[in-house]
Amino acid sequence: MSPALLFFFVIAYFILLLAVAWRTSRGSDNESFFIGNRNSNWMLVAFGMIGTSLSGVTFVSVPGAVARESFAYFQITLGYFFGYILIAYVLLPVYYRLRLTSIYDYLKERLGMSSYKTGAAFFILSRVLGATARLYLVVNILQGAILSGFHVPFWLTTLVILLMILLYTYEGGVKTIVWTDTLQTTCMLGGMVICVIYILHHLNLNLSGALEAMQSKGYSKVFFTDPNSKLFFLKQIIAGIFIALTMTGMDQEMMQKSISVRTLKDSQKNMLVLGCIMLFVIFLFLFLGGLLHLFASSENLPLTGDKLFPELALHHMPRYISIIFIIALISALFPSSDGAITALTASFCIDILGIQRNTALSEANRKKIRQRIHLVFVFVFLLFVIIYKWISSDSMIGIILKVAAYTYGPLLGLFSFSILTKRKLRERLVPFICILSPLLCFLIDSSQEWLFGGKFHIGLELLVINGLITFIGLFLISYRDPLMVDG
């Protein structure tokens, strides 16, 4: 496939994004950038959040892992569904009642300034590590498929993509992202469906025949019943619940879109619809993964992991599939990066710098600070993507979920403590507890062979363990508030 032709379609797609951004960012201010003036349409938000939740990693890594883990990832997705229900009826009412711009303001109201700053700092760390890992995977594919043909270095490819994202998010922020995410999610899912139809036709299979072929190869197993396995269904479902709670309900990027919806009721509908659609979409990704492995077997291609889908789409399928794959891939890339940079900018400005609390700052000065921080995060992303290039892995989704287990655990502990108890904290000790907990989890994770003799494996439930350790640590430094009845 000609790199020049692929490059042409990438540029055309980006021009379309710029047109949408120009149309939606007119008259924008800081309120538009941070929470879309609390006037977003819940159906658009729900649909666009699919793209943000999935990203290029899901687009490439989930299908690539089917040969190794079958359809086990669907167990996690079932957990997501129950997690979204908890977000809708436990977290969103709190956020709307307090009319928050940053969800970490809740920690300040409930536990104090130190907990607030610690929660925001862990979000920033989590989102930088996770979003740049997602970005690295897609940039690496685009580099190999297009830019290496023009002898463009990897770092420059990354910088150009980040500057493209900067161009259409610089003014509009969330107000723009709600619309661009909708466009990009449509392109990503449309591309996936077209790829499924092509492979079914190429292999002369219908849906039931494809599932039977996958079953004969051992690709379609959903539920794993060995309690000692890291894929055991109860562990995976429970982990999925807590991953959804933390990576969506306690994540400023995801929640700034949800709280940009007009009313609590509409925001709850957004979350429940998101959960239902995710079940269908993830199953379709897994089904695509099974088809890709069947296709590779039919062509005698020993491919698996993150290389499977790109290699087949770009080098072993018709030209139109290559074009569709690239458009779908960048459609998966942009929602997970544009929203992350916007949310990180919002959190750093509001939670760390406190520009909304500083009454001495004019609206114009707040906007200048926000724009400068936005630029800084673009270059932070560039740095971390280059680091990931040095330590690249066969499956980035494993890295991302592992990072989430370590960095979202303290957020889980802080929010759980604030909601489930009425106790107060000795504030100066909070950062130490939240740093100590991931360190203890690292020791547990790295000592599994010694602790369990190889008979039991901790998987994604490490996030739950991390949150529990944080909760216990916070309880130990807490005291009864004389003005409140202890829960």
Image: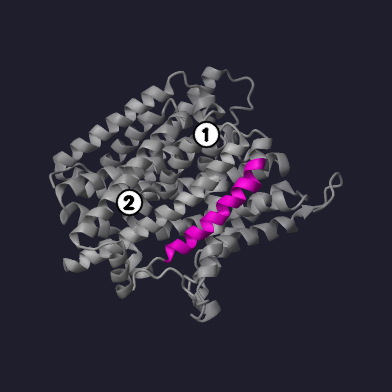
Compare residues 387 and 263 and report the one nearer the observer: 263
Can you identify the residue that label 2 sits on?
137
Q: Residue at x 56, y 58 (%)?
A: 241
Can residue 122 be seen here? The reply is: no
Describe residue 218's horizontal placement relative to residue 201 as left or right.
right
Measured along the vertical axis of the image, is residue 447 above or below residue 125? below
Q: Which residue is mark 1?
A: 346
Q: Which residues are magenta?
A: 72-93
Foreground pick, 475 / 189: 189
**SS class of the residue under badge 1?**
helix
In the displayed orientation, state which residue is furthest to the left.
2
Above or below, 210 against 415 in this view is: below
Picture coordinates of residue 204 (x, y %)?
Answer: 20, 62
Q: Residue furthest right?
A: 482
The crowding category of the residue bearing disc 2, from other C-alpha atoms within 10 Å (few below 14, some 14 to 19, many at least 20), is many
Q: Position of residue 463 (x, y in %)?
A: 55, 60
